[in-house]
Image (cartoon, helix red, strand yellow):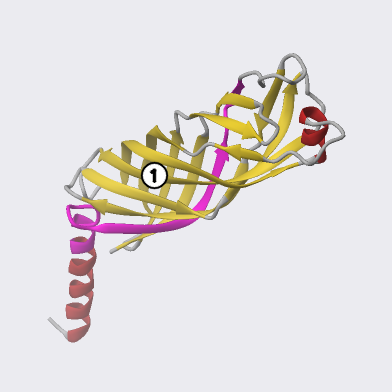
Amino acid sequence: MNTRLKIIAAAVLLVAHWQVHAQSAGTRLVRFGVTQISPQVTSGVMSAPSFTNTQTDVGKDTQFSGGITYMYTDNMSFDIPVALPFTHKLYGAGALAGAGQLGSVKALPFTVFGQYRFNQANSTFRPYLGLGITYAYFFDEKGSSALTATTNPGGSPTSLHVESKLALTPQIGFTYVLNEKWVLDTSLSKTLLKNRTSFSTGQTIDTTLDPISFSLGIGMRF
C-alpha cells in the first residue's frame, strides 16, 4: 500500500472511530445558539386596594444561549443549559387590559436535566426525553408610571419584587449529527412555575407562568 492509500485508510478509520464513540459514555457536547422563553400566563387577581379583576400578563424574550451535555452512559446524559439574562415585560390584563406596560423583570433559569437518549451511540438522529430541576431567579424588577397610577395614584413610584422559585421542567428534544465534529441540537421544555409578585404599596398577585422554552443550537462533540 502506497503512502497516499495509507493516509486515506487512516482518515477513514479515524472518522469511523469518531462516529462509533460520538455519543457514547464519557463524551461531552458543548453547544451555542438561541433560546426563546414564552410564559403561558394564568393570572390571579391583585389583592386590595386595586381595581376589580386587576390581572397581569408577561411577554416573551429571546437570548443567546448554550449548554454542556455529559454522556453518563450510552443512553443517559446530564445537561446544563446556559443563557444571557432574559428580560420580560409585564403588562396589564383583565381590568387593566390596554393599560400598557406595567414594568419589567430580568430572569435567569438555572436548570439541571437528566436525559434519556434513544437509538445507538453512533446514530445520526437521537431523540431524547429529559426532566430537570429549575431555579427560576428573577431580578432587576422595574415598575412603570402606569403601575404607580394603578396601585398608588398621586403617590411615590411603586416598586415590585418577583418571587424566585424552584420548579420541575420536563423536556423533549433531539440531536442530529451534521458531520464528524458538529451536531444540531434542539429542545422544547415547559417549566411548571407558579410565583407571587409583591408591590411596595402592599398588594400582591399570584401568577401561573408555566414558561415554554424553545432552544436551537449548534454543538461540538469532544
In this view, the residue in front, 165 or 215, is 165
Image quarter (top left, top right, bottom left or bottom right) of the N terminus: bottom left
- Residue located farthest toward the bottom when viewing the structure as drawn: 3
State left or right for residue 83 relative to residue 4: right
Q: Quadrant of residue 125?
A: top left
Residue at 23%, 58% in the rendered image: 27
Residue 200 x, y percent position in the rendering: 67, 36
Q: Position of residue 23 (x, y in %)?
A: 24, 52
67 or 198, nearer to the observer: 198
Q: Please, is residue 78 above or below residue 93 in the view?
A: below
Q: Is 27 inside the magenta-drawn segment? A: yes
In the image: residue 123, left or right of residue 95 = left
Number of callouts in the render?
1
Q: Position of residue 83 (x, y in %)?
A: 49, 53
Question: Which image quadrant: the C terminus?
Answer: bottom left
Residue at image position (74%, 28%) is 92
Q: Which residues are magenta?
A: 17-43
Is residue 153 or residue 24 the one in the foreground? Answer: 153
Query: What amino acid is at disc 1?
Result: Thr
The residue at which mark 1 appears reads as 111
Q: Residue at x 79, y 31 (%)?
A: 152
Which residue is found at the position 20% from the left and 68% from the top?
Answer: 14
- Mark 1 is surrounded, within 10 Å at the Cα level, by few (under 14), some (14 to 19) or many (20 or more) other residues, namely many
Q: Determine if the magenta segment contains residue 162.
A: no
